[in-house]
Amino acid sequence: ECQDMQDIPASVREQLGNRLASFRITVVRDQIAKDRTEKLLLKLPDGNFGECVLMREARRRAVCISTQVGCAMGCTFCASGMLGLMRNLSAGEIIEQILRVDRLLKPNERITNVVVMGIGEPLANLPALKKTLETLNEKGGMGLGARRMTISTVGLPEKIRELAAIGKPYNLAVSLHAPNDELRN
């Protein structure tokens, strides 16, 4: 926040605060479950909504992020798929979800993992996802190891190959669309 920059004059902080928005996405609702899992309903600048989730575990602080508004995959078990695809999120909008969650953490807490399992098919928005993963992995970004990031997909073969070509050891989770092993097989 601009007001926290005590090393510049108050008048300059005020001007910056009026011209620069720290966040473009607004938190509409913040729900905390008994296990301290925290789900944020986010309003995007265009009026659409998205979600992200902070999962607090004994040794991990994992953030589940979305990559799209709605989804075109049509999975019958998924509520966001019923909406259809409205649009892809930009890399900035995806990263802002993580920054929003980061602001919820106590000073001694740190985001340890990112799971791309929120609303949307991540590989259908691969250009923005690649920029996001790169930013999270960069030392000047969040410095999060590639092995601490998991991307969930319904299984888009060409996009899986394109993700693999990046050469980073991201985790890949493939959703098999069935409630039991017999149907999965």
Image (spheres, helix red, strand yellow):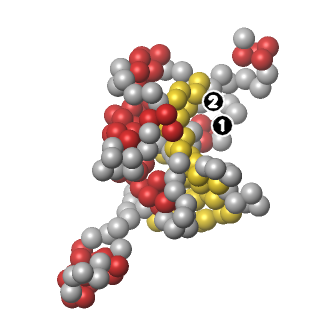
Measure the C-alpha gap from mark 1 to mark 2.
6 Å
User: Residue 113 at x, y = what percent?
Assistant: 53, 44
Q: Residue 123 carries which label?
A: none
Q: Mark 2 points at which residue?
A: 75
The relative height of residue 70 versus residue 156 in the rendered view (above or below) is below
Taking the spot 36% from the left edge, 23% from the top edge, the residue there is 167
Amino acid type of the residue that numbered disc 1 sits on in the rendered structure: Cys
Taking the spot 49% from the left edge, 20% from the top edge, the residue there is 156
The relative height of residue 130 versus residue 140 in the rendered view (above or below) is above
Taking the spot 32% from the left edge, 69% from the top edge, the residue there is 21
Q: Name the residue under label 1.
A: 78
User: Residue 58 at x, y = what percent?
Assistant: 68, 52
Please identify the residue farthest to the bottom as the structure is shown: 10
Q: Quadrant of the C terminus?
A: top right
Residue 9, image quadrant: bottom left
User: Residue 121 at x, y = what percent?
Assistant: 51, 33
Taking the spot 35% from the left edge, 25% from the top edge, the residue there is 166
User: Residue 180 at x, y = what percent?
Assistant: 79, 21
The crowding category of the residue bearing disc 1, from other C-alpha atoms within 10 Å (few below 14, some 14 to 19, many at least 20), is few
Residue closer to the observer: 108 or 103: 108
Residue 23 visible within the image: yes
The crowding category of the residue bearing disc 2, from other C-alpha atoms within 10 Å (few below 14, some 14 to 19, many at least 20), is some
Q: What secondary structure is found at the residue carrying circle 2?
A: loop
Please identify the residue farthest to the top as the structure is shown: 185
Left or right, residue 166 beside residue 86:
left
Amino acid type of the residue that numbered disc 2 sits on in the rendered structure: Cys
Residue closer to the observer: 179 or 136: 136
Left or right, residue 109 beside residue 21:
right
The relative height of residue 83 versus residue 56 in the rendered view (above or below) is above
Q: What secondary structure is found at the residue carrying circle 1?
A: loop
Residue 70 visible within the image: no
Cβ–Cβ below 8 Å for labels 1 and 2?
yes
